[in-house]
Amino acid sequence: MTGILIVDESAVVRQVLAALLRASPGLQVLAAVPGPGFAAEHLRRAWPDVIVLGLTADGLGFLRRIMAERPTPVVVCAAPGTSAEALAAGAAAVIAKPATGLKRSLERDGDAIVAAIRAAAGVRERVRVPEPALTYAAGGAPAAGAAPVAVDRVVAVGTSTGGTQALEVLLPALPATCPGVVLVQHMPAKFTSAFAERLDALCRVRVKEAADGDPVLPGQVLVAPGGRHMELRRADSRYAVRVFEGPPVNRHCPSVDVLFHSVARAAGPHAVGVIMTGMGDDGARGLLEMRRAGAYTVAQDEATCVVHGMPREAVLLGAVDRESPLGSIAEVIFHHG
């Protein structure tokens, strides 16, 4: 049983989250309190497995104290402008806290919220994996004798639940000379910019939120903006991305399938497709199309996934050339990209 402490000054947030979690098997609400002071009293009596924290008042300071004194998975419920600080302070995930329609929005996004909390509960055991066995020369370049990267190669990555933590393992392991990467992480609008900035600070490669028309360049990762789809387009001898508004696909915007289908068309055998931890089946059919177009396709293995849904569906469709643990995916990209 996973014990959860809810800390939020909003009674509506506490009530809705507590109801969602109490209805979810394997999750137990230890307490729902209005602020860090009340939380501190509870922590002296019993320590939770996961803390759900509203980032108001002294919430950020409380998060930093938790990470300094006894690191614990914390899911932050915050407005978009504070997400970068929360991730930098050690939050396992950030969920959107709308300014209006709070109760309706939380209930509508209940499945995703519960999934984020379940993912956070599994962070310690399932995301900390061995570093990939790659050797780099100074400055993050491949060691002497490694083949130079080709500008016509592209890597497409799709992930969802558990992906924010998994990407912090995968992307820092990529060398500065890796092929251009296009990436979809299911995330609400306005959160992806801060997420990309955090990854950029951790990586040899440059990481940025994609803008319409951005070129796909070696040593750069383009992250699809929350709330908009991203496609790969061929632009003369190079690639660029199209970022656009559209209805959800497989209940998601951005959708991994939208990206993968476009990569199959634009890059064919010059691409590597990677599907990682996440709920549902978004990306499975697109990865199959990539494989049929000649791309090399990889799925994160069950043992290192927080949720094995997306990779499992891709495997069942016959879309996957290789299943790899999280810590080995960078090496696979290096050798096939």
Image: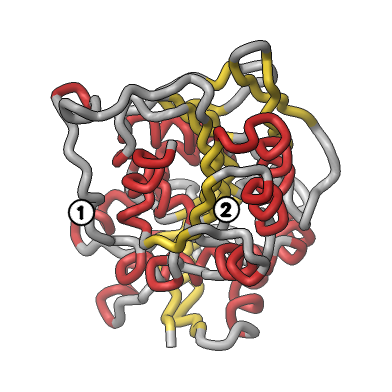
Judge whether 34 appears above or below 177 on screen: below
Structural distance between the alpha carbons of marks 1 and 2: 22 Å
Q: Along the horizontal axis of the image, is 249 left or right of 135?
A: right
Color style of the picture: secondary structure
**Nearer-the-camera pick, 209 or 232:** 232
The extreme right residue here reads 247
Identify the amino acid type marked 1: Ala
Q: Tag 1: Cα neighbours inside 10 Å, few (<14), some, or many (≥20)?
A: few
> What is the quadrant of residue 220 in the picture?
top left
Quarter the N terminus occupies? bottom left
The extreme top residue here reads 236
- Residue 68: which disc? 1
Identify the amino acid type marked 2: Ile
Q: Tag 2: Cα neighbours inside 10 Å, few (<14), some, or many (≥20)?
A: many
Judge whether 48 appears above or below 179 on screen: below
Residue 317 spot, x, y in % from top left = 67, 67
Residue 80 spot, x, y in % from top left = 58, 38
Q: Along the horizontal axis of the image, is 175 left or right of 97?
A: left
Q: Do the residues labelled 1 and 2 touch (CB within 8 Å)?
A: no
Residue 37 spot, x, y in % from top left = 36, 62
Q: Residue at x 19, y 22 (%)?
A: 139
Q: Which residue is drawn at 35% across and 45% down?
A: 330
